[in-house]
Amino acid sequence: KDSVSNLSFFMALNLQLRIGCRVGELKKLKWSSLTDNILVFQQKGGKERIVSLPEEMAEQIMEYKEELETMMETKLSKDDYIFQMRFDRKFGKQDKPFDTSAFNRKLKKLGEQLGIKKNLHSHQSRATFFTEGLDIGFSARDMAGMAGCTITNVERYDAGNLEKQKDIIRKQRY
């Protein structure tokens, strides 16, 4: 229905899966948050978290911006939010901010379309970032730094990995 909303959702999901950001952080991102492949997230308590993006990912975000501008028939300024839920052409502005509930509804619908029976929400896509990163060999410390959380939070995702638990049991020599 709303292609601006869908485009924003897929780019937000891509970022969440690749850099582990929270939906709350995504909501606050403005185009001024991205400079020279560096993305600056505003966190709780006024803290900033800086993520250095691979060049191809920064290019993908800029292509997304161009596509948004074409759909919205306007140029986006550094003060505009990166993720938009709807745009009102008549007034030339965003008329509905990106929100967590809308993100979760779209994620649930995507899961249903893909045949995933579980009720998906944004915490699960963030958890996927942690489990995938740990599975391919990144340290909990590196993952925590990138995602802006504690090492303990990252490790709890790993504790629920049933395949890893089986491996540990198989490798024990008792």
Image (cartoon, rainbow, N blue to C red):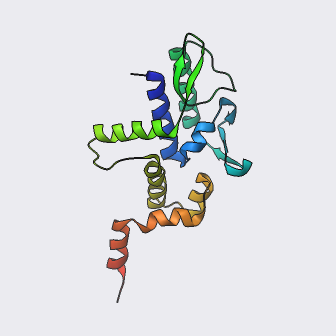
Q: Is residue 138 left or right of residue 108?
A: right
- Find residue 169 and report its horizontal and vertical position in percent: 34, 78
Asked if one can make out residue 35 in the rendered structure from this viewpoint, the answer is no
Pick the quarter of the image with the C terminus.
Answer: bottom left
What residue lies at 58% left-to-right and 27% top-to-bottom? Answer: 62
In percent of the image, x 53 and y 31: which residue is there?
60
Q: Is residue 24 above or below residue 145?
A: above
Q: Quadrant of residue 109?
A: top left
Q: Residue at x 37, y 68 (%)?
A: 164
Report the front residue among 50 and 56.
50
Q: Position of residue 36 (x, y in %)?
A: 68, 35
Residue 22 percent location from the top left of the image: 55, 47
Vertical arrangement, residue 87 with respect to residue 24, above or below: above
The quadrant of the rendering that contains the N terminus is: top left
Q: Residue at x 26, y 43 (%)?
A: 115
Residue 4 image point, x, y percent: 48, 23
Residue 150 seen in render: yes
**Quadrant in the picture for residue 27:** top right
Q: Looking at the picture, does residue 102 appear above or below residue 144? A: above
Q: Residue furthest bottom?
A: 174
